[in-house]
Image (cartoon, rainbow, N blue to C red):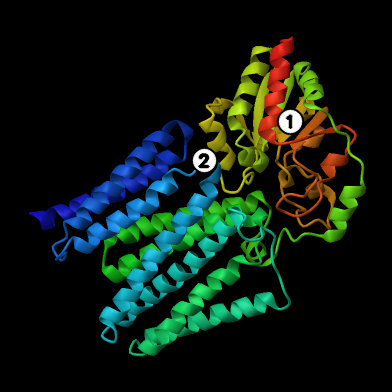
Amino acid sequence: MIEQAIPLLYLAAAASFILALKWLSAVPTARRGVIVGIAGMALAVGGTLLRPEIVSYRWIGAAFVVGTVIGIPMALMPMTAVPQRTALSHAFGALAAALVGTAEFYLQAPRIDRVTMGALALEVLLGFLTFTASLMAFGKLQEILPTRPITWRFQNVVNLSFLGLAVGSGAYLVARPEAAWLFPAFAGLALLFGVLLIVPIGGADMPTVISLLNSYAGLAAAAMGFVLDNKLLIVAGALDGSSGFILSVIMCRAMNRSFTNVLFGAFGQVAGGDRDAGERRPVRSATPEEAAGILQAAGLVIVVPGYGMAVAQAQHKVRELYDVLTKAGVEVKFAIHPVAGRMPGHMNVLLAEADIPYDRLVEMEDVNSEFPRADVALILGANDVTNPAARHDRTSPIFGMPILDVDKARTVMVVKRSMSPGFAGIENELYHLDRTLMVFGDAKAVVGSIIRELSGTGGH
């Protein structure tokens, strides 16, 4: 009876995962998608716990306790740290797949057929490299590690050589599974390549890299499904891997870049000369009180959120500003660039957390035509996605990347803590335009001051 119920539970779980992905793709059904996804995972775990080959639940119980101890603090991480939390989730998932593959190898070798060994090698390779790469991505996002790309001569040759050695070792193990002495070296090469993969990648490319690591983790899980002969793992891993890959493609298109350029282009390397030149060029600054006066007189204000808003946790103050301006008769919209922040949808999540009406959020393709009629483009820490150099400067590393056309607004107001460059590591020429006003300070404090000024003087 139980053995008959397990396939049904797995089938229901697989259907739940597919429906969850479908419903998560649209805002009105996203909440339903989350609930169905949780239900699907519960069915999958429940079905697995019923499998007759489980002879003891002791170690499973211990794993649940360890997972809970790790998972609760992760769940309590602030919304601004969602990219870091996502990177850690990929790391743990990939590590689990790699360790299962390692255990299966030592349990089955040398009596392991080549098809299974091929899937196992792929699982271990992707699992271990995704584990260290995700930890590196977490370190860069958390700014524990340098966020700028670190490059050296012949770096790509060295990296590809290590990847070639790892793939070659895996192929040798497929041909000769009895060569157990080679397995530790194979795993070590995969771990090392994961580190080397992320070192030359700058923070500006991290949203795409996070999506790509998500794809790797999913493919590792799918390979694990072949090794364990678990169809649900194959389905879930394939869904995870393909959705992450599709999202990575979308992100690359949004930045007008290719995969190889993201992985090997060292986009975001700081140009010292540009930075020095930027410090010498004049800018026009304004106080929050002056900014409030300009906003008060505006008819249309387009707010451009970026990582500066996220790191200051200013989204709730932004909601208050939206309320005050709307009450005063000012039309307010929010321009969303697909790679603003540090992961896809980062700004959407933060603004939704502050209960800003979703119909006020406008995607880049639709909002760019509205900037010429906007009285104010209010930029909250969005740097590289507003740099006009992307449109005309062929020497710029961001040339060709679609940007928000904020420079076409009548007044550009930039809230920023300093003149330091963004994650791309290049100067933003927007800050030196005649129509640009720099309001220096923490986004939360500046927006709070503007709100107090507007509240004290009233609206129109």
Q: Is residue 218 visible?
A: no
140 sits left or right of 12 in the view: right
Depth check, mark 1 against mark 2: the one in front is: 2
Q: Quadrant of residue 319?
A: top right
Q: Quadrant of the C terminus?
A: top right
Along the viewing direction, whichever of 309 and 97 lies nearer the viewer: 309
Along the viewing direction, whichever of 6 and 287 lies nearer the viewer: 287
428 sits left or right of 50 in the view: right
User: To which residue does mark 1 refer?
Assistant: 378
Residue at the image point whose x is 36% and y is 74% from the top: 120
Quick one: SS at disc 1?
A: strand
Q: Are marks 1 and 2 in contact (CB under 8 Å)?
A: no
In the rendering, at what x and y percent does residue 146 appear?
A: 66, 60
In the rendering, at what x and y percent does residue 133 appear?
A: 53, 65
Indicate which disc residue 258 carries.
none
In the rendering, at what x and y percent does residue 440 appear?
A: 78, 36
Is disc 1 surrounded by few (<14), some (14 to 19) or many (20+) residues within 10 Å?
many
Residue at the image point whose x is 60% and y is 36% from the top: 313
In the rendering, at what x and y percent does residue 95 appear?
A: 41, 65
User: To which residue does mark 2 refer?
Assistant: 79
Residue at the image point whose x is 45% and y is 70% from the top: 128
Marks 1 and 2, how far apart at CA: 22 Å
Mark 1: amino acid: Leu
